[in-house]
Image (cartoon, rainbow, N blue to C red):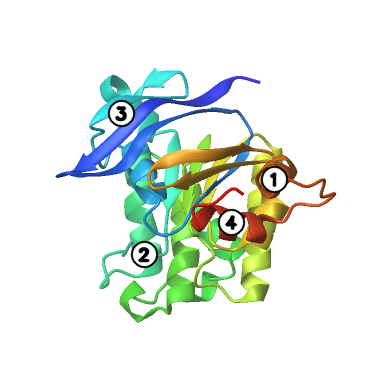
Amino acid sequence: MSVTVEVEHLSKAFGGLKVVDDVSFAIEEGDFIGLLGPNGAGKSTTIYMMLGLISPSSGKIRMLGRDLRSDRQEILARINFTAPYVAFPARLTAFENLMVFAHLYGVARPAEKIMGLLELFDVQHLRNKPVGRLSSGENARVGLCKALLNDPELLLLDEPTAYLDPHISAMVTATLAALSKHGTTIIYTSHNMREVETLCNRIIFLSRGRVIADGQPLQVTQAVLRDNRSDPALGEVFLRLAGGSTN
């Protein structure tokens, strides 16, 4: 497998507060990574630096064999991102918003692609509705449509199921699992530990801006809880690590 992401000694400080502190990791093609941690751990900041939205205070980011600092445009054309907290222009319809992004990504046959994605996430009936009138869950699904428009090689997802009901959430996670099996690399933040256990083949756990656990869900469970569990227990791991104790 080729390496899709290389993060080396990444740090970010806002004023005197260091929110990402010397973070390093490498991710292989097709990995489904759970980027976990309590609120304020540095997860979103790390993702925003990987998107080039925030400049690192120090460190290097390479994705898809290119350096983000010098090749940002080429990288962004091959990756995508969504979070339920990112708002679309409220007056444009779902279809119009997606068409704007389709043109930015140079998507071939954009109307056909958009309708296929709207149907995939069961929001085709909302195509002509202004996004300002969509519910939080509907908006999140339109965001997922946007994230798949360019058939990304790397997908960054910041709590994509946060506003979804259980039925839609299960449909979305099944779609993401299928994408990963076909080679899409996914970095996924969530506070739903059962969801992460099901989806992710590796966990990177951040606390106070630093990596404090990294490995397969069962490996992380056994190492942090210090027992020979036969199944992952990331909920317990989260409580232990978020509390600042590994004893």
Q: Which residue is mark 1?
A: 217
Q: Earlier in the sequence, mark 3 or mark 1?
A: 3
Instruction: Give residue 129's quadrant in the image.
Output: bottom left
* Real-space CA distance between mark 1 and mark 4, rounded to the nearest whole angstrom: 15 Å
- At a point 47% along the width and 73% down the height, the residue shown is 138
Query: Where residue 130 sits in the image (x, y, percent)?
Result: 33, 75
Between 180 and 19, the one lying in front of the other is: 19
Q: Earlier in the sequence, mark 1 or mark 2?
A: 2
Q: Which residue is mark 3?
A: 72
* Real-space CA distance between mark 3 and mark 1, rounded to the nearest whole angstrom: 32 Å
Image depth: mark 1 or mark 2 in front: 1
Query: Where residue 164 sits in the image (x, y, percent)?
Result: 55, 72
Mark 4 surroundings within 10 Å by alpha-carbon count, few (fewer than 14), some (14 through 19), many (20 or more): some
Image depth: mark 3 or mark 1 in front: 1
Query: Where residue 171 sits in the image (x, y, percent)?
Result: 67, 64
* Residues under numbered marks 3 and 2 in contact, where contact means CB atoms less than 8 Å apart: no
* Real-space CA distance between mark 4 and mark 3, rounded to the nearest whole angstrom: 37 Å
* Real-space CA distance between mark 2 and mark 4, rounded to the nearest whole angstrom: 28 Å
Q: Regarding mark 2 in the picture, which secondary structure is present there? A: loop
Query: Where residue 113 sits in the image (x, y, percent)?
Result: 51, 51
Residue 238 against residue 29 in the figure, above or below = below
Q: Earlier in the sequence, mark 2 or mark 4?
A: 2
Relative side of 171 to 146, left or right: right
Q: Regarding mark 3 in the picture, which secondary structure is present there? A: helix
- At a point 62% along the width and 71% down the height, the residue shown is 168
Disc 1 residue type?
Pro
Q: Which residue is mark 2?
A: 85
Mark 3 surroundings within 10 Å by alpha-carbon count, few (fewer than 14), some (14 through 19), many (20 or more): some
Disc 3 residue type?
Arg
**Which quadrant: the N terminus?**
top right
Q: Which mark is residue 240?
A: 4
